[in-house]
Image (cartoon, helix red, strand yellow):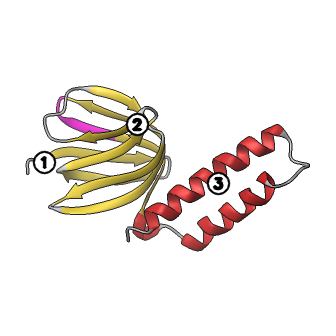
Amino acid sequence: MTSFPLKIVTPDGLAFDGQAEELLVRTTSGDMGILAGHTNCVAPLGMGLAMVLLEGKRRYAACIGGMVTVVSGSVTLVATTFEWAENIDVGRAEASAQRAQRILGSKDASAAELRLAEARLKRALVRKGAAGYR
């Protein structure tokens, strides 16, 4: 399979810089697959599982927020959060999900607290789901 240059960057630094054969990411309008020769584009990232095919092997990650660009055959993914499945602390994700669920079940929570708890729960579920692909 033909490869393309892929760079994955987060606020914490460079997560990947090399050749990939395929990239699947969740955008705000649905899942997007990228192969070599993809047309130029820019898309905002949503919250979901990312898959990178490297030398015939699939590698998974939790990918949350940011954008992906394809320019002249090179792909750059700039994510707010990008965690490879093998690096996800499942216990931490589970604790975050439980805290969010407690707030969501509270009758005293404000609308802002509920929105934040909902976002935290979604992030925790994405992270736990990605961790299942270790």
* Residue type, label 3: Leu
Which residues lie in the magenta part?
A: 72-76
| Predominant SS along the magenta part | strand
**Residue 85 belongs to the span the image colors magenta:** no
At 45% from the left and 44% from the top, the residue drawn is: 79
Residue type of the residue flagged with mark 2? Gly
Q: In which quarter of the image is the C terminus?
A: bottom left
Query: What's the CA distance linking mark 1 and mark 2?
Result: 23 Å
Instruction: Give the amino acid type for the residue marked by disc 1 in the picture.
Output: Ser
Q: Give the residue displayed 29% in from the left and 26% down from the top.
A: 41
Where residue 71 sits, quadrant-wise, is: top left
Q: Determine whether, in the image, residue 103 is placed left or right of residue 19.
A: right
CA neighbours of label 2 inside 10 A, class few (<14), some (14 to 19), many (20+): few
* Vertical relation: 95 (above or below) 75: below
Q: Name the residue under label 3.
A: 121
- Badge nearest the viewer, 1 or 2: 2
